Image: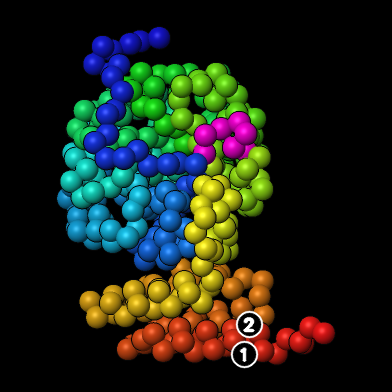
Amino acid sequence: MHTNSRNTHSPQPTRPEPSRRFCAAPMMDWSDRHCRYFWRLLSKNTLLYTEMVTTGALIHGDRERFLAFDPAELPVALQVGGSDTSALAQCAQFAHQWGYSEINLNCGCPSDRVQSGRIGACLMAKPVLVRDCISAMIDACDIPVTVKHRIGIDDMDDYNGLRDFVATVAESGCQTFIVHARKAWLQGLSPKENRNVPPLDYGAVARLKAEFPKLEIIVNGGITTLPQCEALLQDVDGVMLGREIYANPYLLAEVDRHLFDSAAQVPSRLEVMTQFMNYCELELSKGTRLNQMTRHVLGLYQGLPGARRFRRVISEQAHKPGAGVEVIQEALAQVEQGNSALPVAQ
């Protein structure tokens, strides 16, 4: 195995190391700043991740648009996509300067657009390059630098390939590996199919932790309940959920109590929405459209009476010009109406 004396140090973050016991996944088009603010109202301890931003977008694009976040979102990690060491080092400096808790390199996204730019899951075939990228990022900032990747790609030898990738990248000083417990098939499957079709293998991630006990190993993929999280945490250091908490965000309200032993009272859905309306009013005054914010709350009442009416009011009204928080108030009134229609227990 090739070693590089420059790559043997460990990051020494000047900010508190965020807990990764429970993480909310980076999700393109979903985990934007409005979504993250909403999620933070439900859980104080969850580590939140941005959508993936390419190095080119950060260096040449609207940096304010891509990097701005509300301090209330902290702890929050920036996920970047790229494979040029100097560009990634520059983005690591941006992440540090803007106050992020962590910067994460995407080595797991299977989309064709990402592959063509040597970004995402295709980088698993180039562990030495990833090692050098991470090393450059560590040298450039004083916040944790982490990697998110798959258990393999295409015909890569399953566990041996995964182990070799992690061992090589760890030479950079990287301490944290977030592992999506599915292979990525870069040929023949769409990005959407890659989220469901390749079978999950949590055992491979647990084996990785057993073989690299000093590394922090976080498991991601297909996790839907807190009891499932608690079971997986017997073998790894943390869990990351994505689609489930987007579809059913109130799951987050139980995270602090169940996984962080918090004594804080679990917020009610109405309390969360009341606080979120205050946020919406402030953002509306800055020119943000209501539907840019409310699209993230549609699943809050999932499974409860009135949930369908709540979603319908927001879906039909929030996109209209001039729509304000009265749309949310009407949606909440529909939930209340649904609850009042329930038979009274005797």
Q: Position of residue 51 (x, y in %)?
A: 37, 53
The nearer-to-camera label among 1 and 2 is 1
Residues at marks 1 and 2 touching, judged by CB atoms closer than 8 Å: yes
- Gap in Å between the C-alphas at discs 1 and 2? 7 Å
Q: Nearer the viewer, residue 301 or 114?
A: 301
Quarter of the figure with residue 302: bottom right
- Residue 144 to residue 323: above or below: above
Q: Position of residue 338 (x, y in %)?
A: 65, 86
Quarter of the figure with residue 235: top right
Q: How is the image coloured?
A: rainbow
Residue 157 visible somewhere in the drawing = no
Q: Position of residue 43 (x, y in %)?
A: 47, 58
Q: Name the chief secondary structure element in magenta.
A: loop
Kindly give the residue lying farthest to the right in the view shown. 346
Q: Secondary structure at mark 2?
A: loop
Residue at position x 24%, y 58% from top? 68
In-image side of 320 versus 228 (left or right): left
Residue at position x 34%, y 58% from top? 73
Identified by mark 2, the residue type is: Gly
Kindly give the residue lying farthest to the front in the view shown. 263
Q: Position of residue 245 (x, y in %)?
A: 54, 58
Q: Name the residue tied to disc 1.
A: 337
In-image side of 20 versus 130 (left or right): right
Q: Name the residue tied to disc 2.
A: 306
Indicate which disc, 1 or 2, sits on the residue closer to the N terminus: 2
Q: Secondary structure at mark 1?
A: helix
Q: Is 247 in the magenta?
A: no
In-image side of 259 versus 113 (left or right): right
Q: Which residues are magenta?
A: 232-238
- Residue 84 to residue 336: above or below: above
Identified by mark 1, the residue type is: Gln
